[in-house]
Image (cartoon, coloured by chain):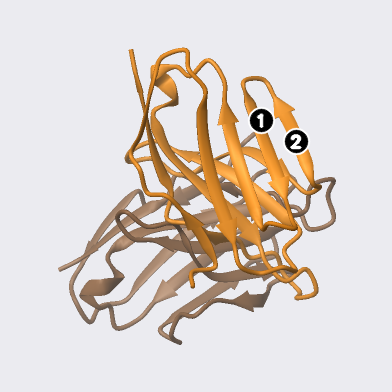
Chain colours: A orange, B brown
Amino acid sequence: QKEVEQNSGPLSVPEGAIASLNCTYSDRGSQSFFWYRQYSGKSPELIMSIYSNGDKEDGRFTAQLNKASQYVSLLIRDSQPSDSATYLCAVRPNVWEYGNKLVFGAGTILRVKS
Amino acid sequence: DAGVTQSPTHLIKTRGQQVTLRCSPKSGHDTVSWYQQALGQGPQFIFQYYEEEERQRGNFPDRFSGHQFPNYSSELNVNALLLGDSALYLCASSQRLGRSPYEQYFGPGTRLTVT
């Protein structure tokens, strides 16, 4: 079982719709969760971090965390063609270990069609 | 506010050679992590440096080594290059005792091609 799993996609949504991206993780001790956006040929850009169960909203982005189900999601409202990118879910496993390495999923490709 | 910088941008090396990649963290950050990203995959953690010491290491062979300098900048060295080392090498910086110690910010990366 991979530590962090994402559907590779591509996920295609029409412009203006809500895009829903999902991620599951295997380490129950994980406490910190992140979403990165990566445009083709570029490096990952941090867009959301979430540490507590529930929802966290930032502009058009909402991150949702359910630790009992070991599930993290990212909702993008009013999707724009400029949102087309690969979205990487990252988890900081094992809060008791020194250091803060991140474990990444393979990413979900999002395509927003105008 | 200067972001994370990396050099060089691109590099082509021959199998068996050695390479050094460089990273300067974001202003105010003291921790540097290195990741390898193969095409179509998520970044894989190589190691992390804080206070000039390697603090955490991923599943990479000893051919991968690093260093952190007093000004927090860092180098990644790879010896005896293999074709499989071709990838995007990413440096990420964070602030260990800051408000958001676990948030990591990536540099633009170095694209390494081994022929």
Amino acid type, mark 2: Asp
**What secondary structure is marked by label 1?**
strand
Left or right side of B94 for B78: left
Q: Distance from label 2 to label 1 (Cα)?
A: 7 Å
Amino acid type, mark 1: Thr
Left or right side of B105 for A82: left
Name which residue lies at 81% across and 47% down.
Answer: A52
Taking depth in this image into account, of B70 and B59 the one nearest to the observer is B59
Name which residue lies at 62% across and 27% down.
Answer: A61
* Number of marks: 2
Is B101 situated above or below B50? above
Residues at discs 2 and 1 in contact (Cβ within 8 Å) = yes
Judged from this view, the residue extending furthest toward the left is B115
Taking depth in this image into account, of A20 and B34 the one nearest to the observer is A20
Judged from this view, the residue extending furthest toward the bottom is B62
Q: On what subunit does the disc labeled 2 rest?
A: A
Left or right side of B1 for B19: left
Which quadrant is home to the C terminus of chain B?
A: bottom left
Residue for badge 1: A62
Whichever of labels 2 and 1 marks the residue nearer the N terminus, that label is 2
Name which residue lies at 75% across and 53% down.
Answer: B95
**What secondary structure is marked by label 2?**
strand
Residue B113 drawn at (x, y percent): 23, 61
Judged from this view, the residue extending furthest toward the front is A69
Name which residue lies at 49% across and 79% down.
Answer: B65
Residue B15 drawn at (x, y percent): 19, 77
Residue for badge 2: A55
Q: Residues within 10 Å of mark 2 (few under 14, many from 20)?
A: some
Q: Residues within 10 Å of mark 1 (few under 14, many from 20)?
A: some
Residue A37 drawn at (x, y percent): 49, 38
